[in-house]
Image (cartoon, helix red, strand yellow):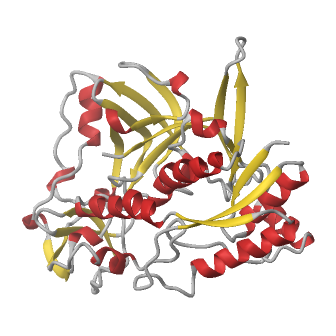
Amino acid sequence: MKKVVVGLSGGVDSSVAAYLLKEEGYDVIGLFMKNWHDDSVTISEECPWLEDSNDALIVAEKLGIPFQTVDLSKEYKERIVDYMFKEYERGRTPNPDVLCNREIKFDVFMKIALQLGADYVATGHYCRKGTITRNDGSKTYQLLAGKDGNKDQSYFLCQLSQDQLAKTLFPIGELTKPEVRQIAAENNLVTADKKDSQGLCFIGKVRLPDFLQQKLKPKKGVIVEVPSDVSQYQKSKPKFETKEDELAYYSEKPIYHIEDGRVVGEHQGAHYFTKGQRKGLDVGGTKEPLFVIETDVEQNVIYTGQGKSHPGLYRRTLFVKKEEIHWVRPDLKLVVDQTMKVLARIRYRQPLEKATLYKIDSGLYVDFENRQSAITEGQFVVWYVGDELLGSGVIS
């Protein structure tokens, strides 16, 4: 009998994942991860880890499976929290959920599971795994979108490797959320009607400015409103010698100066803000709401523009450095001068957009058919062919 360790989070998805595996005849063990926790910045009523671990225990007892808690706070602090501080300090916006999957659930947690003699690790993610078996018997694993288009979570798993996928099961990938809740209700699982947790992976709902202020001290600076017709967009398009020159031009971040607009307010630190952000600016009196179009952490200035259609929010092309490209399917990896037509997204839940990958010596350009709003450094761009996620990279 194959042994599976299920990451029981105390939510309905992982509860049903454990139930389905048991029904299929696996020897199932439930493991709850306690990650880094700080009550001073957590809105504790929203997602207290104690309540979650208790729900996970009740589900394990109901299913008649062994259960234990593992404390991964130290690893989480080192690998996720410290990384987040560093990225925000640099004026980038990290994605802790993607990192949590790569560094914690499918690395530290998976190693613990394998030490317990598990053949597989299973999670309650809405995605699927495909297997391609070659003539020589070797296998290549595919990361496929979940059947429920509203809940597909393949984006969060975009940094997984073939070795990690080989040892992973996604029992609810073929189901929709309503079907998962129905299975939980029919089997009287305590999590059947539990609300989905919001917030950082296994930390709970966090007040981000409070969280960041632990390490990044407030620092008063100005908010500048840049008019939509600023010269940045009026410059005539150069003639491009090569496709690479054109892509480099379109992927360039705009550079603003205070004199490009007018000072409309003050902020407590450019590193607390991210591109596309509207909340927290506290500037009134404009015809349309202000959105952050750029942050300058060196000069501590936030540049904003009026309305969602401000040209400063949009770019057609982005770049991923060579060392930050990751192929879930290394057999399909592009070599220099190769291109690939894909569907791509730059954030979770964004509809997939047509794009072309261009591989150059120093990295990879992702050139979208349509300009994208708020391309944000530090976030992940992911690319698909059909419903298969082939790779990802950190936006430079």
Relative side of 280 to 68, left or right: left
Where does the image place residue 148, in percent across and percent down from the top left?
A: 73, 54
Picture quarter with the C terminus? top left
Q: Which residue is drawn at 32% across and 52% down?
A: 377
Query: Eyeballing the image, is 49 above or below 90?
Result: below
Where does the image place residue 304, in percent across and percent down from the top left?
A: 25, 69
Where does the image place residue 380, in percent across and percent down from the top left?
A: 43, 49
Image quadrant in which you'd find residue 164: top right
Relative side of 81 to 87, left or right: right
Number of labels in the image equals 0
Where does the image place residue 181, in percent across and percent down from the top left?
A: 81, 68
Image quadrant in which you'd find residue 290: bottom left
Query: Eyeballing the image, is 100 above or below 240?
Result: below
Image quadrant in which you'd find residue 22: bottom right
Q: Which residue is drawn at 52% across and 75% down?
A: 204
**Is 342 or 43 nearer to us in this picture?**
43
**Is 157 or 8 nearer to us in this picture?**
8
Q: Which residue is drawn at 9% across and 67% down?
A: 258
**Is 213 or 70 nearer to us in this picture?**
70
Relative side of 80 to 286, left or right: right
Relative side of 163 to 302, left or right: right
Query: Eyeballing the image, is 100 above or below 384?
Result: below
- Residue farthest along the left direction in this orientation: 259
